[in-house]
Amino acid sequence: MQSTVAKEIRFDGVGLHSGAPVCLELSPAPSGHGIVFVRSDIAGDKTETRAARIPARWDAVVPSQLCTLIRNEDGVELSTIEHIMAALAGCGVTNVIVSVDGPEVPILDGSAAPFVDGILAAGLVRQDGPARALKILKPVQVETETAIARLEPSDTMEIEFHIDFADRAIGVQDKHLVMANGAFVRELSNCRTFCRQAEVDMMQANGLALGGVAGENAVVFDDDKVNGGPSGLRHADEPVRHKMLDALGDLYLAGAPILGRYVGEKSGHAVTNALLRKLFATPGAWAFVTVDAKTASRLPGAGVSRADLAFCA
C-alpha cells in the first residue's frame, strides 16, 4: 500500500552551502500524489503555486558537482535534496509535500537521521491504492573516466559501493547491504556528508560551504587526520556508508523504490542520475510492477521502527 506522513513535521536548520536559515516542512499528501517539493518562499498566492512546485523526479535533476539539484519548467530550483529523499525512501513514504522556504534543504547534522527520526516519531498513514516498484529487468551501466554505476536485476533492493581516496583516514572502503528490515535506518541513516580539507578551503574561497561546520554537520578529512566532532566517526567506514545513503536518495528520484542491485564504484550524484537516464532510455531494461505483501517486505521501509535509530550509534 501507499503511505504518507500522519501529520505535518517541521525541521529548522541552515543550508550547507548558503549558510542561510531554512525551514523544511513535510505535509500529508493523497494517494497517487507522489513526492513533490514546493518552494514556499516563492509560492505566493494560488496562481503562483504551480511555478513553485518541483517534482521529485530524475528528469528534473540538473547538473551540479556538489549535491543533487532539481529545477522545474519555470526555472525554480532546490538543492541538496539527497538526504531528505533518502529518509523518505528508507521510511517507505510514497506521498508527501516537502515545503522549503529557500533554495536549499537544511543540512541539519549532515545525515538523514534527523529526518528519519521526525518521520518515524510522527508516524505514517497507510493509504488506499496499490504501491508500485521499479523492477530492473536487465543490467544497465554508465561509466566516466573515474567512476562506474550499474543497476542489475534482483528480487530485493541492494546497494553495493566502493570508494578509494588518497587520504589515509579514508583509503579503500567497500560495503554491500540489502535495503530491507530497517537496514537503512540502522546502518546508513546517521552517516554524515564528508569532504577533504582542501575541498573545504576551495569551496569557502568561492562562497560555498558557508553553513558547514566540521564535526557538527560534516566530517572533514586531511590525509590521516579526521575531524568528526567530539565523538569521532559514527562508523569506522562512515564515508562509504554516506555514499550509499546518497545513492538511495538519488535512486528514489526514479519515482518508486527500485527492485534491483545498484553497484557504485567511486560514483556520485551526477553518475547516479546519468544511470537513471540511461535506464529509462533503454527498452526492456525496466518495468513498473505492483507491490504485493511479499514484494513490500523486500523494499526499503519494510520493518522500520523508531527503535532502529538506537542502533545507529
Image (cartoon, rainbow, N blue to C red):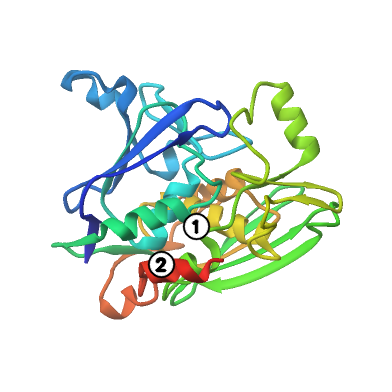
The image quarter in which residue 58 lies: top left
User: Is residue 137 among what the camera can see?
Assistant: no
Q: Is residue 179 left or right of residue 37?
A: right
Q: Nearer the viewer, residue 152 or 199?
A: 199
- Judged from this view, the residue extending furthest toward the bottom is 294
Where is residue 264 drawn, in percent x and y? 64, 60
- Judged from this view, the residue extending furthest toward the front is 230
Q: Which kind of residue does numbered mark 2 sit on? A: Pro
Q: Is residue 245 left or right of residue 309?
A: right
Where is residue 143 drawn, in percent x and y? 68, 52
For the residue labelled by badge 1, is the local secondary structure a helix, a strand or a loop?
helix
Q: Which kind of residue does numbered mark 1 sit on? A: Leu
Where is residue 227 drawn, in percent x and y? 74, 48
Q: Tell me the tag on residue 248.
A: 1
Residue on which the image places disc 2:
300
C-alpha separation, residue under disc 2 versus residue under disc 1: 9 Å
Residue at image location 27% in from the left, 23% down from the top: 43
The quadrant of the image that shows the C terminus is bottom right
| Residue contact between numbered discs 2 and 1, judged by CB atoms under 8 Å | yes
For the residue labelled by badge 2, is the local secondary structure a helix, a strand or a loop?
loop
Residue at image location 60% in from the left, 52% down from the top: 192
Q: Is residue 108 above or below residue 226?
A: above
Q: Tell me the tag on residue 138.
A: none
User: Is residue 284 among what the camera can see?
Assistant: yes
